[in-house]
Amino acid sequence: MRGAIIHGPGDVRFEERADPEVVEPTDAVVRTVATCVCGSDLWRYRGITPVRRPTPIGHEYVGVVEQVGAAVTTVRPGDFVVGGFLHSDNTCAVCRAGMQANCLHGGGYDGCQSEYVRVPNADGTLVATPGTPDPDLVPSLLSLSDVMCTGWHAAVSAGVRPGSSVVVVGDGAVGLSGVLAAAQLGATTIVAMSRHEPRQRVAREFGATHVVAERGEEGLAQVRDLTEGIGADAVLECVGTGEARAQSVELVRPGGTIGIVGVPHGDLPVDSLFWGNKGLRGGVAPVRAYLPHLLDLVWRREIDPGRVFDLTLPLSEVAQAYRAMDERRAIKVLLEA
Amino acid sequence: MRGAIIHGPGDVRFEERADPEVVEPTDAVVRTVATCVCGSDLWRYRGITPVRRPTPIGHEYVGVVEQVGAAVTTVRPGDFVVGGFLHSDNTCAVCRAGMQANCLHGGGYDGCQSEYVRVPNADGTLVATPGTPDPDLVPSLLSLSDVMCTGWHAAVSAGVRPGSSVVVVGDGAVGLSGVLAAAQLGATTIVAMSRHEPRQRVAREFGATHVVAERGEEGLAQVRDLTEGIGADAVLECVGTGEARAQSVELVRPGGTIGIVGVPHGDLPVDSLFWGNKGLRGGVAPVRAYLPHLLDLVWRREIDPGRVFDLTLPLSEVAQAYRAMDERRAIKVLLEA
């Protein structure tokens, strides 16, 4: 088969790789229908996270089960499936506590921007759709493999509930998904921090009641005007830089919570949290915990998180996809296999 | 009147001070019945927080209202009252959100280890008891002015609920109050980390199901044995040192929360929280939010948080009280005015 290999900063190639096989009896092999590029893939593409050797890349996919190991009972060949960006057994004590991203027996994938994917812990990772999806549902299903569940995790972690005021920091696919999550969870004031018109538009479609383009003191002042002068009940931190993290601490009110899902790449002023009585929750999204509910919402066409994809390319043009996202020409690129 | 003045490290004196008066129409003056020394007072007594000039000290008290300003409506002369260690208007947007410690118009006191106390924002700060309390209730009522509400804040912030597993880091009066709070909130596994026999005994009386004397790796292993190998649902961090904060991050499970009330005096590995999907909430306790409920529990003799006081001295011997707590000869010293 062929798949994406990152060789170094700015250097992703579509190359021949060994066909994946069932190795453990709990494995499945999935034929990829669609995959995509994640904002977190860009850390390596941009040279911020080092690439020490050519490495298969990608961790988001939907597809059709080709083959399963002898111990797999919940999916079978021919099923259309969604899997999270980490595999999990969904039975250990951590999974039972709802934190499948931290599964005691879980881990990452060997590159999902490829024609086939080996899925360890298939029963604890994959969820099958009720049938073969209409093609127009594929983007939304694919979004569940990471960004929509990650935005959802930000909102759940921040304790968003009916009537909440919410600020979303970050207008990438995860931040936009966070807007959608906040709306679904009943927030009534949803502020998207965004300077980019196409992203502002998606944010409004997803339920943002306000868009604030300004950053720093001016952005803070605008949020305060919308939140009785004290900051928001919940802030979704969907970037990870020190600037975004510090801004989130300013934007949340005393007693409120920051739902943090941006991969940490900078300081967070933790003692300011204490003195402000501000909470912090979140981390890597437990996709498997959220998949059944969100898949149901997508299947019933109640949410359309796939609108974060604004460019579609064939998988063979994966290098173009990285370039478009790196240059912010696309919010998120869908790759058809 | 006379009151405690801290002149420098190890130097607290009981000296003549000006009688407090009603300055603002929202003030009350309270004649102190009992006051006490707080673990946080020791930061200055030990020279860790500098003392730049002789300063009245103390922030916990119960007493009888002597005088009120013209705008005060909820308490009147003769009422026995409890006040939190910070005053608050209890009407601003932050107070309405339940975070009275961060009141937009609140602040600290001008020394409560004294015969009289001026209480700003009396209506938003003081809560009167239903009548004159029996003398044996005074210690428990006094504990509500800080430590019991602070322990409660740790437990509430950590999301303790029926069936929770809870570890309490810190066996001072706040930590012990946290044990009592966890028990009241329905936790079924409550681990007190304590090496001191008298404190272990109070912890067990307050509801600790287990006491772990070991620290570091050995203590962690013992907690893991009690929590399915993954750590506790909730950890109450009641110390504030870097060691206690780092240990708390280790002790909590993925998806669990650290309720943090120890005044920060050291690092907290915030990115470990992210990678472990561990939450952090808390800060300075909003005493006024918790007072009505906890006062009711004390009045009905359902809880007896005053057991944290294991030494009683006359207020004039306040210097002895500091010495006893500094040397860990007492958990907490009650001063009778």
Image (tube, coloured by chain):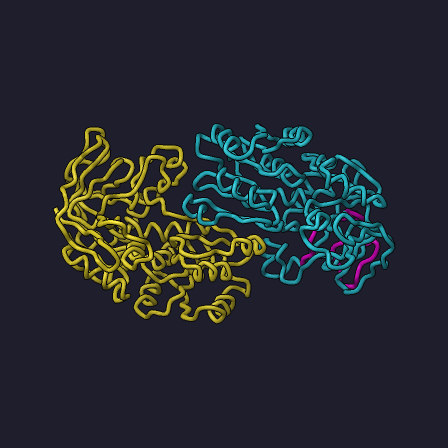
Chain colours: A yellow, B cyan
Residue A107 drawn above or below residue B224:
below
Q: Where does the image place residue B188, in percent across and percent down from the top left?
A: 54, 31
Can residue B195 be seen at all in this image of the molecule? yes
Q: Is residue A215 left or right of residue A23?
A: right
- Please name whichever residue, A100 or B264, is drawn nearer the observer in this view of the structure: B264
- Please name whichever residue, B296 or B108, is drawn nearer the observer in this view of the structure: B108
Q: Quadrant of residue A28?
A: top left
- Please name whichever residue, B40 or B295, is drawn nearer the observer in this view of the structure: B40
- Please name whichever residue, A118 or B49, is drawn nearer the observer in this view of the structure: B49
Q: Quadrant of residue B313?
A: top right
Q: Where does the image place residue B314, in percent across and percent down from the top left?
A: 84, 42
In the image, the segment drawn in magenta is B62-88
Q: Is residue A190 left or right of residue A59?
A: right
The total number of labels drawn is: 0
Instruction: Determine the residue located farthest toward the front in the rendered image.
Output: A52
Residue B216 drawn above or below residue B84:
above
Can residue B78 be seen at all in this image of the molecule? no
Q: Is residue A46 left or right of residue B113?
A: left
Report if residue B102 lies within the magenta region. Answer: no
Report if residue B80 lies within the magenta region. Answer: yes
Q: Where does the image place residue B205, in percent across and percent down from the top left?
A: 66, 29
Residue A332 drawn above or below residue B281:
below
Q: Quadrant of residue A84?
A: top left
Q: Where does the image place residue B136, in percent across and percent down from the top left?
A: 78, 35
